[in-house]
Structure formats: structure tokens, C-alpha cells
Amino acid sequence: MKHPEYQYPPYFKAKLLLAIGDKENSFSAFLPFAKKKRNDFWVWDALADAFSEKEKKIACFCKALSLKTPEDYLVKTRQKLADLLINEKKYDEAKTEIEQIIKVRENNKWKIPPIIKQWQKQDWYSSAKSLGNNKEFYLRHAGEAEEVLFDDIPEEIVVVEFINKNKHILNFVKDKAKNGFFNYESLLKDPQIGDILSVRIKSVGNEGFYKAITVKQMPRSTETSAIKEFEGRINIIPPHNFGFVDDVFFEPNIINNNNIAENQPIKGSAILSFNKNKKEWGWKAFEVNV
């Protein structure tokens, strides 16, 4: 490209292709631009127009509405999503969107569109329950939109090794060759240590930080080399009150919270963990049965 500073030609090309009904080539033309502008809500709104499948449209609108954007800009996107939700008989979620649209329009003294007034008069609207917001709904579906955009990046299976809930940061481990951390806000609701995730991630810098692109929780039966089962008798080391079952390390809080006594038989699950002080890999208990 002779002029990389010109960012919008792919967008306008895609819009022209979409206007003549060439949705497949429209999507291909729009894809590189959408990846660069993925944090702009209107990109996902526009991307929804390139799909005919309702599920993908809903996912794109959910992604658009999950981004930090002034509410005044979102009324049309909310209306498009509400229309789809009504057709899918997701009436509680639809009513939640409609109420938000009305609130913003009234605050700005904008007219209420006739279609919204029509929806309010329908039987489903009076019986539907407003949810206050649709954040959980967005979280469940926005990942589908990201998958469409980044399906050329391979998914990896990783395990949650540590969580900083205040900063929405989690540490993960894949194997002895790869571990790190990323911000999970807007991607996961309530991750737990030992959760198995399928992720698309990109390394940022050299300090182990990754940018999470897509994140999906996987069943516990998912195969991973970062978790193993163990069984045996514990050896507790005073006075610090940590312990071992064979090569599995027990932190004091695990011992204290479970009232574990010296030489007690225990079985459970351990996660692969890197000891920065000793600069070596080992196993750390995170789930026990006593």
C-alpha cells in the first residue's frame, strides 16, 4: 500500500461491495480494517451488516455495545439489536435495550422512533422483565464476533494459575514453554484458579504480558499438560505451615482452609507453576479432597 496513512479506503470499498450485494468480498475487504479498529463500536455495527446469519449479527452488536462508548452514539446500534432480539423471542433482553434507547433519547430531547412506540404497545413488552442492563448477555455473545474476526489466529489451551480480581488480571500457564498474564475484563465474568480456557492471545512486550483476543471457558475434561491429579499423605513443614504430597506443593492457605493435619491422606488436583525464586517448574495444589 503506497499510503498506509490512508486508513479508510478498505472501509469504503467494503461498503460499496455490500451495496451491490457482494457480501463475501465485502467482508474480506473490511477484515484488515476491522482488526485495526476493533475497539471502535461502529466497526462492529458495520461488520454486522456483512452477515446474513442472525447469530453473527447479534454477536457483532453485542461486541459493539460492550465497548466503552458514549451512550448518545449507541441508540441506533441498540435498536438494531433489539429488533433481532424480538425476532428471536428474547423479550427480556429486547426490553432492556429499548428502555436504554428511550432514556437516552428523552435525555437529549430526541424523538422516539415509531417502531419503538409500536414495540411498547405489543403484548410481549408488558410481560417482559427489564434486566437493568445486558452486560452478561454481551459477554456471552461478544466472543463469537471476535472469533469471526480472528479465526486466522490459532486457539491455545491454557489454565488459570493466579487471579488479581482488583486489576482484572489473570496469570495463565500452557506448559513449561509458555506462561504469562492478560487482562480478562469484558472477556470473563468470574474466573477461578484451575479454570481451563481456550484463548487467542498475542504477546505484548517482553515481560510476559499478553493481549487476549478471544477467551472461552472449557470443560474440566479438556486435555491439558498443566493440570495433574495426585494422591498421597501430606508432609507439613513447620513453622511456615506449607507442605508436600510427593512433588505437589501446598500453600499454607490451602492447609489452613481445609484443616489439613500432618500425614493426612489427600487427593486432588495440582497446576503447573513456575517458582521465580528458585527459577524452576513445579506442581502446586489448587483443589483438594480430604
Image (cartoon, rainbow, N blue to C red):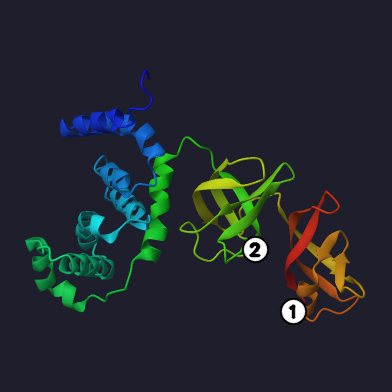
Q: CA distance from mark 2 to mark 1?
A: 16 Å
Secondary element type, mark 1: helix
The residue at the far top in this view is 2
> At 21% across and 64% down in the image, what residue appears?
101
- Residue 273, quarter of picture: bottom right
Between residues 82 and 70, which one lies in front from this camera angle? 70
Side of 288 where 113 appears, left or right = left
Q: Earlier in the sequence, mark 2 or mark 1?
A: 2
Question: Total marks drawn?
Answer: 2
Classed neighbour count for the residue bearing mark 2: other residues with Cα under 10 Å, few (<14), some (14–19), many (≥20): some
Whether residue 2 can be seen here: yes
Secondary element type, mark 2: loop
The residue at the far bottom in this view is 259
Quadrant of the frame with the N terminus: top left
Q: Position of residue 50 (x, y in %)?
A: 26, 39
Q: Position of residue 223 (x, y in %)?
A: 64, 50
- Pointer 1 residue: 257
Between residues 240 and 91, which one lies in front from this camera angle? 240
> At 39% across and 42% down in the image, what residue appears?
148
- Pointer 2 residue: 193
Side of 153 where 267 appears, left or right = right
* Amino acid type at mark 1: Asn
Please give the label number shown on residue 47.
none
Q: Are marks 2 and 1 in contact (CB under 8 Å)?
A: no
> At 36% across and 27% down in the image, what residue appears?
5
Q: Position of residue 51 (x, y in %)?
A: 27, 42
Quadrant of the frame with the C terminus: bottom right
From this view, report whether residue 122 is shown above or below residue 33.
below
- Residue 48, quarter of picture: top left
Between residues 177 and 233, which one lies in front from this camera angle? 177
